[in-house]
Image (cartoon, grey):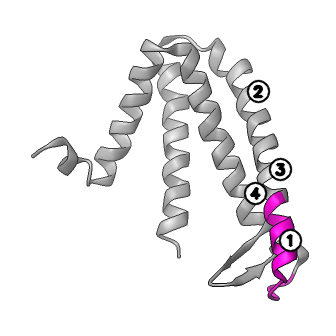
């Protein structure tokens, strides 16, 4: 069974991605912090999106307004723009803060495996919510 076939299994894919992050950390520890920041920023932005705007097939809803009423495209566009800005700014700040204050002070394998496993777990949770919950 080849690698591509093994990667069809979700648990193998999750462990594979964890392994890649761990290898990348050992080869390029400074660049690894940027990857972690990118993943955290994306996850924050995706959470912001789910809180601020919903919809599909031409229907736009803005949940934080407390209604499921269909909104106008212009309003939806503006909320979408805000979500991109808020998600990027908050995600970038949080990713940098975690990277600078938590991850860069870690030593040993256990301390490296834990944040990588948390990030991989959060990415899988986001994947599951995005594709399995609908």
Determine whether label 2 and label 3 are within 8 Å by CB. Answer: no
Q: Is residue 104 above or below residue 122?
A: above
- The tag earlier along the polypeptide, 4 or 1, is 4
- The tag earlier along the polypeptide, 4 or 2, is 4
Q: How many marks?
A: 4
Q: Which residue is mark 3?
A: 86
Residue 58 picture location, percent across and down: 68, 84
Q: Is residue 1 left or right of residue 94?
A: left
Q: How would you rate the neighbour count of disc 4 (Cα within 10 Å): few for under 14, some for 14-19, many for 20 or more? A: many
Determine whether label 4 and label 3 are within 8 Å by CB. Answer: yes
- What predominant SS class does the magenta segment belong to? helix
**Marks 3 and 1, how far apart at CA:** 14 Å
- Quarter of the image for residue 65 reads bottom right
Residue 133 picture location, percent across and down: 52, 72
Q: How would you rate the neighbour count of disc 3 (Cα within 10 Å): few for under 14, some for 14-19, many for 20 or more? A: some
- The tag earlier along the polypeptide, 2 or 3, is 3
Determine whether label 2 and label 1 are within 8 Å by CB. Answer: no
Q: Which residue is mark 2?
A: 97
- The tag earlier along the polypeptide, 4 or 3, is 4
Residue 15: give its label: none
In this rendering, the label closer to the viewer, 4 or 3: 3
Residue 48: give its label: 4
In this rendering, the label closer to the viewer, 3 or 1: 3
């Amino acid at each position: 069974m080849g690698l591509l076939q093994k990667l069809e299994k979700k648990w193998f894919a999750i462990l594979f991605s964890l392994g890649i992050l761990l290898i990348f950390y050992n080869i390029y520890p400074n660049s690894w912090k940027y990857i972690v920041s990118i993943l955290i920023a994306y996850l924050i932005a995706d959470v912001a999106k789910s809180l601020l705007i919903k919809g599909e097939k031409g229907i736009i809803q803005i949940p934080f307004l407390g209604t499921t009423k269909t909104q106008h495209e212009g309003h939806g566009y503006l909320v979408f723009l805000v979500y991109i800005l808020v998600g990027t700014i908050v995600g970038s700040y949080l990713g940098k803060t975690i990277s600078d204050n938590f991850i860069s002070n870690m030593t040993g394998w256990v301390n490296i495996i834990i944040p990588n496993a948390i990030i991989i777990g959060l990415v899988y949770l986001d994947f599951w919510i995005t594709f399995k919950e609908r």
